[in-house]
Amino acid sequence: MAACRRCCSCLRLRPLGDGPLRLPGRDRALTQLQVRALWGGAGFRAVAVDLGSRKLEISSGKLARFADGSAVVQSGDTAVMVTAVSKTKPSPSQFMPLVVDYRQKAAAAGRIPTNYLRREIGSSDKEILTSRVIDRSIRPLFPAGYFYDTQVLCNLLAVDGVNEPDVLAINGASVALSLSDIPWNGPIGAVRIGMIDGECVVNPTRKEMSSSTLNLVVAGAPKSQIVMMEASAENILQQDFCHAIKVGVKYTQQIIQGIQQLVKEIGVTKRTPQKLFTPPPEIVEHTHKLAMERLYAVFTDYEHDKISRDEAINKIRLGTEEQLKEKFPEADTYEIIESFNVVAKEVFRSIILNEYKRCDGRDLTSLRNINCEVDMFKILHGSALFQRGQTQVLCTVTFDSLESSMKSDRIITAINGIKDKNFMLHYEFPPYATNEIGKVTGVNRRELGHGALAEKALYPVIPKDFPFTIRVTSEVLESNGSSSMASACGGSLALMDAGVPVSSAVAGVAIGLVTKNNPDKGEIEDYRLLTDILANYNGDMDFKIAGTNKGITALQADIKLPGIPIKIVMEAIQQASVAKKEILQIMNKTISKPRASRKENGPVVETIQVPLSKRAKFVGPGGYHLKKLQAETGVTISQVDEETFSVFAPTPSAMHEARDFITEICRDDQEQQLEFGAVYTATITEIRDTGVMVKLYPNMTAVLLHNTQLDQRKIKHPTALGLEVGQEIQVKYFGRDPADGRMRLSRKVLQSPATTVVKTLSDRSSIVMGESISQSSSNST
């Protein structure tokens, strides 16, 4: 059948009888997806949103029209396409099976991937972290009980190297879901706020971000509600941070209005799901009668710890579920389980709302007991143990050479502007931390996200000119809430124990939220903010904030409601700041400032001055000497400039070995203080066709005296002059060739009648091991 050459907008669809839609001249029936695609050509819509000096262009209806929803968001020449698809049949999962994938394309930056397949493989850390931010922004707005497989894919179409694509992807996800028939209570809008010279900048360019003291991403919902926040900051003041949030929320409302305008023009109708997985009211009511009093007794027994409380709750759960199965034999297993969960959550939250108490006996603003230790293991460069309640984190610090810094692929650099970094924090959460068993595999998304947050918290206090690459590892040994903020506290202690001259100590805390909604107005009627929350506290927000006594360095707000007012966020920041200062006071009792010097078994850095003329000898053929030195002693050598090399040794003993090795390879290459124009006695060591190899002193590397410099006459071979190996001849020194550093000698000029004086030489070394980078000096930076 010949292909139709008419464009989609010119097609005329008409029903044939009562059957499906058909094209004129075709017998094959069209599916619903094909009809949607054919009409898409005429359904292109676009809207532009002004964000101060920036413009956000949103369009839909041209690309990926088989998806339930698709959108392209563009700023400058950076464009991101986002698609959303959700199944119409429910998933067997007992949760919202939402998958968000943000994928960077090398072609979008005009590059080819550098891996051996020359194509995109796997997901980078940046892609995973951006996917998490998008997920946290859109997940709270799905209806409760919507357990249908849903996938949101974000593809970079073009990257101009000026405008960041991650915020565009959040807005693209909002548009794609809003324009689809997927049940979703959006839209949302997202902006990035930078702070340059004390002024807030909306969606700053990459160049502007390099001089910004703040990197805040805010996702807002209608009525100036906040859905998600993610921030890193250069220790900025609390009032500046709060002002930036308000500015961000203001501009998110403009984006939301633009999306709403697009939705109105297209006329979106949301589908009705087959079923929303919520427990029947009659089962919940019966569960309340069966278990409420026993649950209340457990939650108000302050002698329980995490394990015993969980065991007591599970015992009540098993008995209650058996009774419910007898009472409601036709009920699904999920309905029975979820009914108990609803009642347990209601009892837990009512104690907080009505009695201002938590299940561990604390009031709403009290911290758990905190214990700190440093210098846990003498052999480590730095170590600390931070214990907060039943959350225990062991942090270690390791120094290595600057060559060990994390290298960024040139494609990632082109897309994200991320360059090498010499500070990193790696977070580990083994299964035994929660009394479980499981596979110990690579880093999962949660571990990557928690580690990135703790790294953001500590990075601003690390000196920029520190002579080592720093790796902080945070291993969670026990977990009962806020292990990422415990990692920030433990990491700060470990850095000071290692002698890193941090500008200030850093502490972090998690703030929770329990709300009571007005069912008629759909608004928050009452709420309680909780300082230092436990794991699984049945709340509505996990608000993590870290910083110093002076200001804020990192923030992450994971909100489970469709949005919360700015007022609650401001109160949470204030409450967190008070708790943060209290934590810092406790930490300062253990160690209040960095150690004056690093540990004796710590790494050492020294410099070597190698004249240009001696570099070939020092490096060796094909880098042989350097490779052998690094293999035998474990040191790392990097070139600083033309005549300076930096030697990193993991221990002082390794540096001693490296010194001996360097002395040995340079033993026969001792430079002399030669005088320009002076005459010296040279010894012939080898006869060649082009000339003779001579030495001015025994431990010198032989140099070539070319045939043209042997005699006034033109000769083809040195034997024509009767020269032999071992013979001594007089030569005149004319310095070194500025291009390659070779010594310039001549015998020919001495055949003139001018008198000469023969100089004698004394040994003197030119390759000098420089002073080590002292521990005290590095700490003073």
Image (cartoon, helix red, strand yellow):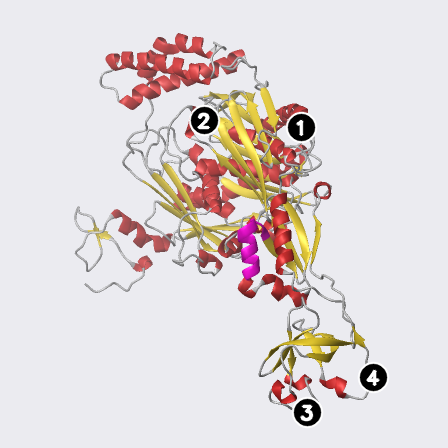
Depth check, front residue: 103 or 465: 465
Find disc 2 in the rendering and name its residue: 433
Q: Earlier in the sequence, mark 4 or mark 2?
A: 2
Q: Earlier in the sequence, mark 2 or mark 3?
A: 2
Distance between the alpha carbons at the discs numbered 2 and 1: 26 Å
Above/below status of 49 relative to 5: above
Name the kind of residue labelled 4 in the image: Thr
- Image position of 741 (left or right of 518): right
Q: Which quadrant is the C terminus positioned in?
A: top right
Q: Earlier in the sequence, mark 2 or mark 1?
A: 2
| Magenta region, residue range | 624-636
- Image position of 333 (left or right of 393): left
The answer to whether residue 633 is magenta is yes
- Image position of 397 (left or right of 764): left
**In the drawing, what numbered circle is on residue 713?**
3
Q: Which quadrant is the N terminus positioned in?
A: bottom left
Element under disc 4: loop
Distance between the alpha carbons at the discs numbered 4 and 1: 75 Å
Density class for disc 1 (Cα within 10 Å; few <14, some 14-19, many ≥20) is some
Density class for disc 2 (Cα within 10 Å; few <14, some 14-19, many ≥20) is some
